[in-house]
């Protein structure tokens, strides 16, 4: 008995199936395609030496950016580390670098392409390194949402504010409709600005950052916030609910930060008496409300740098960063643990591994441009406008 092969059955995989397998691409999606070259084996004992040699051969022509959530094996080759916006600005400040190798995810590489010159080429070592949060808001869905707001008679009162963790299409929509971009560290300033321009805010794509900033930092109530679900007719909201709301929150979230729960906070307090709970504002509202400290990735790092020796910390953010900080501050007697008992990496960020980095660097060193991330000019213009409004925030 023989087993029929797919070609024998004349069955063609659907576009979605191919996308999930990493064999096709949606240009408006954070998901990417398979690596077009032969990757070195992860077990190759020469990977570190090969990466170092390729980087040395490229010299000043290459500038490697490493996001805080990257693996240590990749971070060791980064010229600078930071959050997504800091890295994009660092790239723009290095005009002599022909190649920007962004060890992060797709939307970050897009931002770098928007902010760098036309002569610079941004490379993402693995095109499948995306962001589930950014994928939760597509250009078509957001355009439909705006139609719903228009039909409710409130679109002219609404100012879009989009988190940096969004696609170039969403940033462009924001710029075109008079809005601004924000980071987790300046969300309060962005919302203050937005409410000076209009009466309501459409916050994309992370509902938790929008809610936490509005309620925790600005004194609004939970009743001032509604959640727009793009998978339901009219976002699952009535026109009356939209008219009554101040904050219209997109139904999106971070797959890592969304895992932390109130039980996580209560459990770590029982296990480690005197622990300081420090979480990212992408966490759920009840987690943020129960934490001792809340702040961006950069805030978390600075807080631990300033913490007294012997202090105890439970951190609610991506595990690669938490482990790196725990190792860094262990000699100072600072006890740093992951907030949740369940290990949780950012799975798409972790697609950038040493084999992909080696492949990208060696390809560039041989004169072959691979995995270039390039935003079209119209999208870039409107996205840059939204970013420039953020840069102009007081």
Image (spheres, rainbow, N blue to C red):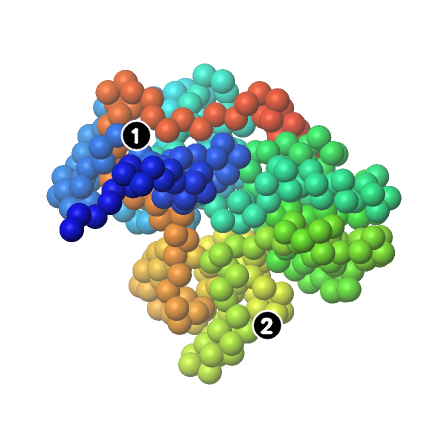
Residue 25 versus residue 329 in the image, above or below: above
Question: In what element is the residue under mark 1?
Answer: loop
Q: Can residue 387 be seen in this view?
A: no
Alpha carbons under labels 2 and 1: distance apart: 47 Å
Q: Is mark 2 on a helix, strand or loop?
A: helix
Left or right of 14? Residue 209 is right
- Name which residue lies at 50% across and 38% down: 29
Residue that mark 2 sits on = 290
Q: Which one is in front in this view, the residue at disc 2 or the one at disc 1?
A: 1
Q: In this view, does 92 lie above or below 79?
A: above
Label 2 crowd (10 A; few <14 / some 14-19 / many >=20):
some
Above or below, 254 relative to 88 = below
Residue assigned mark 1? 36
Which residue is more in the foreground, 111 or 128?
A: 128
- The x and y percentages for residue 194 are 76, 43
Number of numbered discs: 2
Q: Left or right: 60 with respect to 1? A: right
| Residue 335 position in % (x across, y down) | 38, 69
Which of the two labelled residues, at mark 2 and mark 1, occupies the earlier sequence position?
A: 1
Q: In which quarter of the image is the C terminus?
A: top right
Residue at the image position 29 percent from the left and 24 percent from the top: 364
Residue at position x 44%, y 28% in the image = 373
> In the visual, does 224 lie left or right of 341?
right
* x then y, percent, for residue 265: 51, 74
Q: Quadrant of residue 268?
A: bottom left
Q: Which residue lies furthest to the left in this view?
A: 45
- Establish if 211 lies above or below 160: below
């Amino acid at each position: 008995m023989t087993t029929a092969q797919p070609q024998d059955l004349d069955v063609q995989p659907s576009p979605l199936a191919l996308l999930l397998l990493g064999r096709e691409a949606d240009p408006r999606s954070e998901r990417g395609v398979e690596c077009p070259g032969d990757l070195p084996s992860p077990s190759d004992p020469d990977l570190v030496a090969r990466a170092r040699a390729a980087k040395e051969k490229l010299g000043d022509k290459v500038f490697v950016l490493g996001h805080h959530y990257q693996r240590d094996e990749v971070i060791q080759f980064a010229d600078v580390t930071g959050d997504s916006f800091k890295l994009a600005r660092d790239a723009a400040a290095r005009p002599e670098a022909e190649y920007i190798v962004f060890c992060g995810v797709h939307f970050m590489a897009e931002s770098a392409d928007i902010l760098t010159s036309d002569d610079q080429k941004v490379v993402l070592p693995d095109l499948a390194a995306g962001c589930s949060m950014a994928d939760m808001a597509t250009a078509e869905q957001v355009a439909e949402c705006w139609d719903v707001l228009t039909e409710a008679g409130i679109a002219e009162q609404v100012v879009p504010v989009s988190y940096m963790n969004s696609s170039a299409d969403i940033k462009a929509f924001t710029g075109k409709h008079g809005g601004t971009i924000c980071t987790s560290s300046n969300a309060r300033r962005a919302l203050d600005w937005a409410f000076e321009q209009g009466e309501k805010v459409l916050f994309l794509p992370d509902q938790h950052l929008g809610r936490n900033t509005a309620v925790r930092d600005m004194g609004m109530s939970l009743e001032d916030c509604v959640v727009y679900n793009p998978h339901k007719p009219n976002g699952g909201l009535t026109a009356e609910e939209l008219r009554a709301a101040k904050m219209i929150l997109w139904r999106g979230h971070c797959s890592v930060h969304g895992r932390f729960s109130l039980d996580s906070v209560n459990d770590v307090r029982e296990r480690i008496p005197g622990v300081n709970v420090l979480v990212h504002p992408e966490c759920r509202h009840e987690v943020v409300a129960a934490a001792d400290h809340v702040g961006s990735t950069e805030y978390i790092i600075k807080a631990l740098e300033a913490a007294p020796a012997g202090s105890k910390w439970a951190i609610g953010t991506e595990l690669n960063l938490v482990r790196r900080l725990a190792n860094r501050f262990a000699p100072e007697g600072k006890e740093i643990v992951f907030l949740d008992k369940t290990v949780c990496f950012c799975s798409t960020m972790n697609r950038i591994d040493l084999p992909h980095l080696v492949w990208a660097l060696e390809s560039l060193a041989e004169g072959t441009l691979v995995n270039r991330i390039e935003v079209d000019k119209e999208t870039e213009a409107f996205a840059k406008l939204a970013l420039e409004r953020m840069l102009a925030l007081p």
